Amino acid sequence: MRMALAVLFFAGICTAQTLTTIAGTGAAGASDGKMDQPYGLGIGPDKALYYCEIGNHRISRLDLKTKKTSVVADGQGEPYEIAFSKAGDLFFCDRVKQQVSKVDRRTKAITVVAGTGKEGFAGDGGPATEAQFKQPHSIAFTPDQQLLICDILNFRIRSLDLATGTISTWAGTGQRGPAPDGAPLTGTPLDGPRALAIDKAGNYYLALREGNAIYRLDVKGGRMYRFAGTGEKGFTGDGGDARQAKLSGPKGVALAPDGSLYIADTENHAIRRVDRNGIITTVAGTGERGDGPDGDPKKAKLARPHGVFVDAGGVVYIGDSENHRIRILK
């Protein structure tokens, strides 16, 4: 009996996670180790961490070995999220400029790949550079390298074919409305399409910010299924079926190597995880706004986290936006 208890105790120690700040001081700024509202983030082909700073109007790079930072794209509007193509080029979505741009991996040149810069809705079936968006927020590459764009206030997901340069509506009707569980992917309204997560196996997940839910998209079957959240705003459900949990304005999603999904439950100031069995737990944050402290992630407060990313080793990167920090959970 004692040995069994000892084994369980040891296992508990081994699986305990720690929350650590790896960048940012807690104060907004553009120098001296400071940052200003980190949002979307991810690991690049060079194994460095790239992250959007909407308050500094730039995308920055953190060398995880040397801890040195550098600026990748400066003078932008409000870059919200990033995605890397198979070729290693960095794409980012600028909500204020109403555009999607690319940073060439070799030349570092920045070019607009979608959007005229004028707010509206236009361009489907034609060149993406002549299209109009209304607050584009999140981007993600499909396995066949189509770039999906969450066009928030057009209540659509748009698809950019990089080979032809054309754009089309991929999901959404242009009208805001609820998405019934099991509804067709085509012709169903979307209530605040905010963020996408897609893995190499073709698993798609969509965060609906105003819908307070996460949907699993069965692309082959052409259906969308509620994966987490009842649709009602709140902070409940830990330890149970994710579909019965309440979320509050989720703005980020990330798939982990073990098949679990991490959610930036932004207005709950928390990061939540749905495991492969569909069980949801809070892995960082208390549900109350605050700043840490680092250490026990269940006792550390966050402030409207927007970005979440999980690397190949299962390390979770968090854009703790209004604490002006990037934290990791491992």
Image: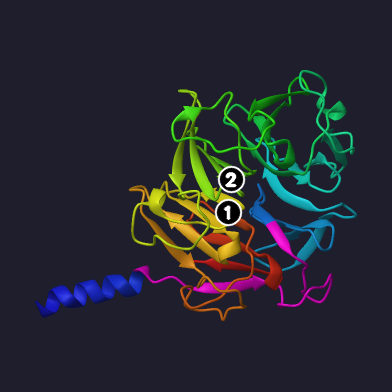
Identify residue for label 2.
Answer: 208
Residue occupying image coordinates x 41% and y 61%: 281
Per the image, label 1 sits on a secondary structure element best described as: loop
Residue occupying image coordinates x 48% and y 23%: 220
- Give the magenta part as a residue range: 15-39
Identify residue for label 1.
Answer: 250
| Amino acid type indicated by mark 2 | Leu
Estimate the x, y position of residue 291 in percent, counting from the top left. Answer: 62, 78
Position of 203 relative to 57 (above/below):
above
Residue 103 shows up from this direction: no
Residue 258 vs residue 308, the one in the foreground:
308
Q: Is residue 259 left or right of residue 121?
A: left
Residue occupying image coordinates x 40% and y 48%: 243
Local crowd size for mark 1, using a 10 Å CA cut-off: few (<14), some (14–19), many (≥20)? many
Tell me where residue 30 sits by quadrant: bottom right
Q: Earlier in the sequence, mark 2 or mark 1?
A: 2
In the rendered image, the quadrant that contains the N terminus is bottom left
Residue 9 vs residue 278, the one in the foreground:
278
Number of residue marks: 2
